[in-house]
Image (cartoon, grey):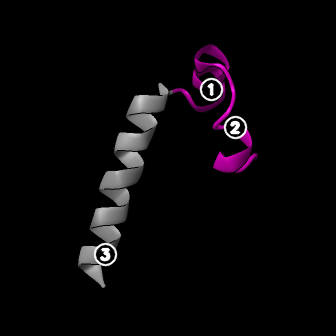
């Protein structure tokens, strides 16, 4: 599995193929997960 830093520069089509999500949706989920983790600490 590649790290986000390795795939963030991919084309939108390749990014979606690799993650199953668009870049915008991926970023949204990362932000929500980060917020959740911070609240749980």
Q: Is residue 26 magenta?
A: no
Q: Is 30 located above or below residue 25 in the figure?
A: below
Residue 7's disc is: 2
* Disc with the residue nearer the chain's start (1 vs 2): 2
Q: Where does the image place residue 34, in percent across and percent down from the top left?
A: 37, 63
Main structural element of the magenta stretch: helix, strand or loop? helix
Q: Is residue 15 above or below residue 34?
A: above
Question: Mark 1 — residue?
Answer: 15
Q: Residue at x 42, y 42 (%)?
A: 27
Q: Residues within 10 Å of mark 2 (few under 14, many from 20)?
A: few
User: Considering only order in the chain, which callout, 1 or 3, is on the residue closer to the N terminus?
Assistant: 1
Q: Left or right of 35: which side holds 34?
A: right
- Secondary structure under the numbered disc 1 in the rendered image: helix
Occupied quadrant, residue 12 = top right
Magenta segment boundaries in residue numbering: 1-20
- 10 Å neighbourhood of mark 3: few (<14), some, or many (≥20)? few
Q: As rendered, which of 9 and 36 lies closer to the eye?
A: 9
Quadrant placement of the C terminus: bottom left
Question: How far from the left and from the top, in percent, is residue 25?
Answer: 39, 32
Image position, residue 31 (x, y; %): 35, 53
Name the residue nearer the viewer: 10 or 40.
Answer: 10
Residue 40, quarter of the rendered image: bottom left
Instruction: Give the residue number, with chain letter if any, for mark 3.
Output: 38
**Residue contact at pointers 1 and 2, CB within 8 angstroms:** yes
Going from N to C along the chain, the mark reached first, 3 or 2, is 2
Above or below, 23 against 3 in this view is: above
Cα gap from disc 3 to disc 1, whole angstroms? 27 Å
- For this orientation, the residue located farthest to the left is 39
Cα separation, mark 3 vs mark 2, equals 25 Å
């Amino acid at each position: 599995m590649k790290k986000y830093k390795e795939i963030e520069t991919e084309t939108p089509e390749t990014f979606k193929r690799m993650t199953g999500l668009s870049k915008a949706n991926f970023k949204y989920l990362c932000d929500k997960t980060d917020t959740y983790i911070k609240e749980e600490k």
